[in-house]
Structures are given as C-alpha cells and as structure tokens.
Image (cartoon, grey):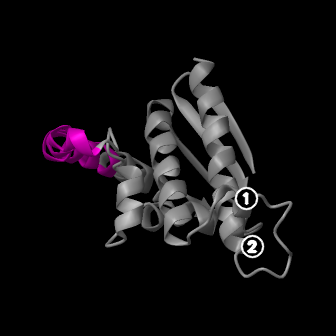
Amino acid sequence: MEISRLNETTILIARIDPVIAELLRRIIPSADPGDNEKARARIFSAPTQDPEEDHFAEDWREYIEPGLARLFQSALEVIEGDLQRMHPDPATGEATVSFPSDHLEQWIHGLNQARLVLSERHKLNEDEIDPETLPASDPRAFLLLQLHLYAQLQLLFLRLLDAR
C-alpha cells in the first residue's frame, strides 16, 4: 500500500492489497459501539471520575455528548463516502482510492474511534495489543492486524496533515 499527496487537495492510497481493502471497509462497523457500554464509555469518556462532581458529568452527557456523537458520525460518513470510490483493479486485485485532503481529520477521528471500540469490544489491554507478545496461533491475530493498520494510518494521516 502506498499513501501520498497527489497535490494540495488530494490524498491517494494506491496498491491496496485485498485484505487491507477489507480492513478499510471495516472501519465503519468497527467504530460502532452498539450496546457495548464499556465501548461507549471509552469514546464518550466522562470529564471527571470524581463522585462529588456528578453534576458536571451529567451536564457533560446532556450538553457535550450529543455534539460529540454528531461529530463522530459525520467523520464516519465522510470515510464511508470516500471508501465507496475504492475499486480493485481487475488485473491485479489491488485497489486505489483518492479523497480530498480536507478529509484527513475525519479519517483520523474515525480510525481512532474504531481502535477504541475494537479494543473495548474484545477486552484487549495494552500488553495484548503488542504483536511481539502475541503467539502466532492466537485467534486475535487478524484483529491485531486491523488495530495496527488503523494506528499506522492515523500516524501517516497526521503527518500528511502537519505537512500542509
């Protein structure tokens, strides 16, 4: 996979392997916490854990969380729209997709949300996310590939964003 800035307004991801293309398509469903309360708490983390400030946490849930939910959903919609333009080359099977560089922040947010939700949904802690400590026979190997791909994309997109 190759990621580059075509020009000031366009990001190109080329030579996307079919497995990586599938992981990209999984960003949207992976970012959905659904009914998982721990995943929801992870992406909508309370501003304080102090029981004496429950009123502040209630105000946060009432006034801030809805705006965050709209922001998160909007980012995922942008990613979904961008990914609809990803199509494989019939000759090689590798896909290519381009999207406006203005979408980089939405991609970063969506990838982060997917990573947080996946980690909570699968009850992974920091030690388990390290591929160096995971046995090759562990059934979570594909999940870890997904988490690491999303982390690497976030890093690359942050660098592209900073290079503006």
Look at label 1 and name its amino acid. Asp
Task: Describe the element under mark 2 as helix, strand or loop.
Answer: helix
Whichever of callouts 1 and 2 sits on the residue coming sooner in the sequence is 1
Residue situated in front as seen by the camera: 92 or 123: 123
Q: Is residue 20 above or below residue 98?
A: below
Say if residue 20 shows up in the picture: no
Is 161 placed left or right of 155 in the picture?
left
Q: Is residue 51 above or below residue 155?
A: below
Residue 55: give x, y in percent of width and height.
14, 41
The residue tagged 1 is 127
Residue 71: give x, y in percent of width and height.
29, 42
Q: Residue 141 — which label?
A: 2
Task: Describe the element under mark 1 as helix, strand or loop.
Answer: helix
Look at label 2 and name its amino acid. Ala
Is 105 placed left or right of 64 in the picture?
right
How many residues crowd around disc 1 within 10 Å: few (fewer than 14), some, or many (20 or more)?
A: few
Looking at this rendering, what residue extends furthest in the front direction? 52
Say if residue 15 shows up in the picture: yes
Residue situated in front as seen by the camera: 161 or 52: 52
In the image, what residue occupies the spot 50% across and 55% down? 116
Boundaries of the magenta span = 51-73
Disc number lying in front (1 or 2): 1
In the image, what residue occupies the spot 69% across and 35% down? 4
Q: Is residue 152 above or below residue 128?
A: above
Q: Identify the image quadrant of residue 161.
A: top right
Magenta stretch secondary structure, dominant: helix
Residue situated in front as seen by the camera: 13 or 59: 59
In the image, what residue occupies the spot 70% across and 60% down? 129
Label 1–label 2 contact, CB within 8 A: no
- The Cα atoms of the two marked residues, 1 and 2, are separated by 14 Å
In the image, what residue occupies the spot 39% across and 51% down? 43
